[in-house]
Image (spheres, rainbow, N blue to C red):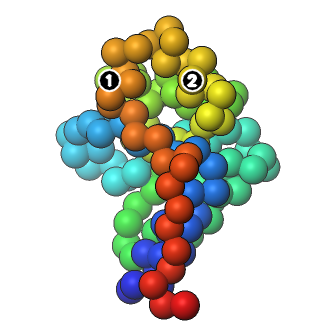
């Protein structure tokens, strides 16, 4: 199981990853992770699909939703009516978004500078 978690972790840090801690997924019986992932066929879409595949091996359900890009991803993440609880966004889009939504700065976890290395080298 450790290698599955490492694969999932490595997949998540390929781009700025934002998680908005919320109870969206806990309130419903839907997927545990709802990932807003950009356009189908794009780079973020591929990361989301890989995460979905790796997560399935650990019996963690992931729903991937297509979006117009980073700003829509962040809008969905911040919307309490949205089930989205994970997304990827470009660092400059996050910076731009937080200028208009400074109250969200403490709620978005930004992993853009975080480096994680597998323990089973």
Q: Quadrant of the C terminus?
A: bottom right
Q: Residues within 10 Å of mark 2 (few under 14, many from 20)?
A: few
Is the residue 44 above or below the residue 76 in the image? below
Q: Which residue extends farthest right?
A: 41
Quadrant position of residue 34? top left
Considering depth in this image, is 100 or 69 the residue closer to the camera? 100
Badge 2 element: helix
Badge 1 element: loop
Instruction: Give how far apart the Cα atoms at labels 2 and 1 are.
Output: 21 Å
**Which circle's residue, 2 or 1, is located before the other in the chain?**
1
Circle 1 residue: 80
Considering depth in this image, is 39 or 10 the residue closer to the camera? 10
Considering depth in this image, is 101 or 86 the residue closer to the camera? 101
Q: Residues within 10 Å of mark 1 (few under 14, many from 20)?
A: few
Q: Quadrant of the N terminus?
A: bottom left
Q: In this rendering, does residue 111 appear at all?
A: yes
Q: Residue at x 68, y 48 (%)?
A: 44
Q: Which residue extends farthest bottom?
A: 121
Circle 2 residue: 95
Give the left or right position of residue 90, taking residue 112 as reference.
right
Q: Residue 30's spot in the image, x, y percent?
A: 33, 48
Is the residue 46 above or below the residue 59 in the image? above
């Amino acid at each position: 199981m450790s290698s599955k978690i490492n694969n999932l972790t490595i997949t998540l840090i390929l781009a700025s990853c934002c998680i908005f801690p919320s109870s969206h997924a806990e309130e419903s019986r839907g997927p545990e992770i709802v990932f807003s992932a950009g356009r189908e066929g794009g780079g973020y879409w591929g990361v989301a699909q890989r995460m979905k595949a790796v997560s399935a091996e650990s019996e963690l359900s992931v729903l991937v939703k297509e979006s117009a890009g980073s700003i829509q991803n962040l809008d969905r993440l911040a919307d309490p009516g949205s089930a989205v609880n994970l997304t990827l966004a470009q660092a400059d889009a996050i910076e731009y978004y937080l200028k208009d939504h400074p109250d969200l700065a403490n709620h978005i976890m930004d992993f853009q500078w975080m480096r994680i290395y597998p323990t089973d080298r």
